[in-house]
């Protein structure tokens, strides 16, 4: 069973509304999602980096967590405490494994490269 959700979430506010409250350009770890709470609570993934492929995972578990997965390292940013129960921890491990599989094989879900 896959944990990562590669589908692009639907916006809940217009681009203009989002830009008026967005934290873009703020210190690392600050993120303002423009998606429903239900979408934000899933393990959202997208492939980034062209010649240096990596996968970015975002999830809301108490606070926003952004995990950038590379073949042999992770970069994790959070804007507060992230709380994971045992199932959430297992999902985190699975999400990282799935992301590394995508990086290693290039096998991505149908829409991951359409972003």
Image (tube, grey):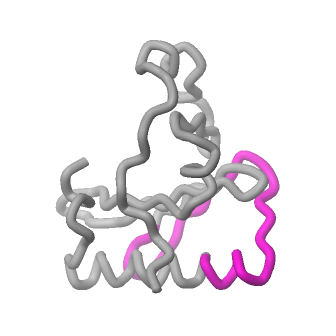
Picture coordinates of residue 58 (x, y %)? 54, 56
Picture coordinates of residue 34 (x, y %)? 52, 34
Residue at the spot x=44%, y=13% of the render? 16
Q: Quadrant of residue 56?
A: bottom left
In this rendering, the answer to whether 40 lies above or below 111 is above
In this rendering, the answer to whether 55 lies above or below 23 is below
Picture coordinates of residue 44 (x, y %)? 48, 59
**Residue 87 in magenta stretch:** yes
Q: Quadrant of residue 51?
A: bottom left
Residue at the spot x=45%, y=80% of the render? 2
As drawn, is 99 to the left or to the right of 113? right
Marker count (numbered): 0
Q: Which residues are magenta?
A: 69-91
Picture coordinates of residue 101 (x, y %)? 34, 84
Residue at the spot x=36%, y=49% of the render? 8
Taking depth in this image into account, of 114 and 39 the one nearest to the observer is 39
Residue at the spot x=42%, y=61% of the render? 45
Taking depth in this image into account, of 49 and 45 the one nearest to the observer is 45
Taking depth in this image into account, of 23 and 60 the one nearest to the observer is 60
As drawn, is 74 to the left or to the right of 76? left
């Amino acid at each position: 069973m896959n944990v990562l959700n590669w589908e692009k979430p639907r916006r809940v506010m217009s681009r203009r509304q989002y830009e008026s409250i967005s934290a873009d350009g703020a210190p690392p770890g600050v993120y303002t999602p423009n998606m429903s709470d239900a979408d934000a609570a899933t393990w959202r993934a997208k492939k980034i980096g062209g010649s240096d492929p990596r996968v970015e995972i975002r999830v809301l578990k108490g606070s926003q967590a952004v995990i950038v997965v590379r073949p042999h390292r992770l970069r994790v940013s959070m804007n507060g405490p992230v709380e994971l129960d045992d199932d959430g921890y297992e999902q985190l491990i699975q999400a990282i494994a799935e992301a590394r599989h995508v990086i290693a094989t290039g096998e991505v879900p149908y829409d991951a490269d359409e972003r």
